[in-house]
Image (cartoon, rainbow, N blue to C red):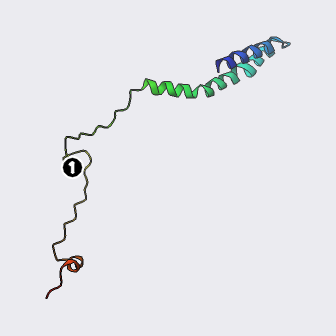
Amino acid sequence: MYIIAIGWTFVTLLMALTETSFVAGVLTFFFYGLAPLALFVWLFGTPQRLRNKQRSLPPAPRPTVDFAQPAGSGGTEQCSAKPHPRPQEGSDASSAAKRPPDR
């Protein structure tokens, strides 16, 4: 990226030197050289700036799991749902189908 910036600066500097007046040379160098070059460097430097920013930040803490404690023993995530009670033996129709017929 920097070789392109250096080359473009050289080309626009030579263009500015060939202008007929000093004001035209300065305006040529600014509007054909520095302004577009600043935009180019800013746009194409964005990925590197983001990588540098990520490197400068401390690493995010990784969640840890304590395998020594059983699940539901006061962890941070609690389930508010209550467990379903088990049906009594013989209280539903499916258990009647499993019993032997009465004689």
Which sits in the foreground, 76 or 103? 103
Quadrant in which the N terminus appears: top right
Residue 55 in the figure: left or right of residue 31: left
Residue 34: percent from left, percent from top: 70, 19
Name the side, left or right, on which 47 lies relative to 25.
left
Q: Amino acid at mark 1?
A: Gly
Residue lying at the far bottom in this picture: please name it. 103
- Determine whether the residue tagged by mark 1 lies in a helix, strand or loop: loop
- Image quarter of the C terminus: bottom left
Residue 14's quadrant in the figure?
Answer: top right
From the top left corner, tell me how far across and down residue 12 is, in percent: 76, 16
Residue tagged by mark 1?
72
Q: Quadrant of residue 65?
A: top left
Position of residue 73 in the picture relative to residue 63 (left or right)? left
Query: Which residue corresponds to the image point at 25% horizontal and 45% vertical from the top-left?
Result: 76
80 above or below 97?
above
Where is residue 96 drawn, in percent x and y? 20, 80
Q: How many marks?
A: 1
Q: Residue furthest right?
A: 20
Q: Looking at the picture, does residue 72 appear above or below residue 16?
A: below
Question: Residue 75 at x, y = what percent?
Answer: 23, 45
At 25% from the left and 50% from the top, the residue drawn is: 78
Residue 73 is left or right of residue 8, and the answer is: left
Q: Quadrant of residue 9?
A: top right
Q: Residues within 10 Å of mark 1 (few under 14, many from 20)?
A: few
46 shown above or below 90: above
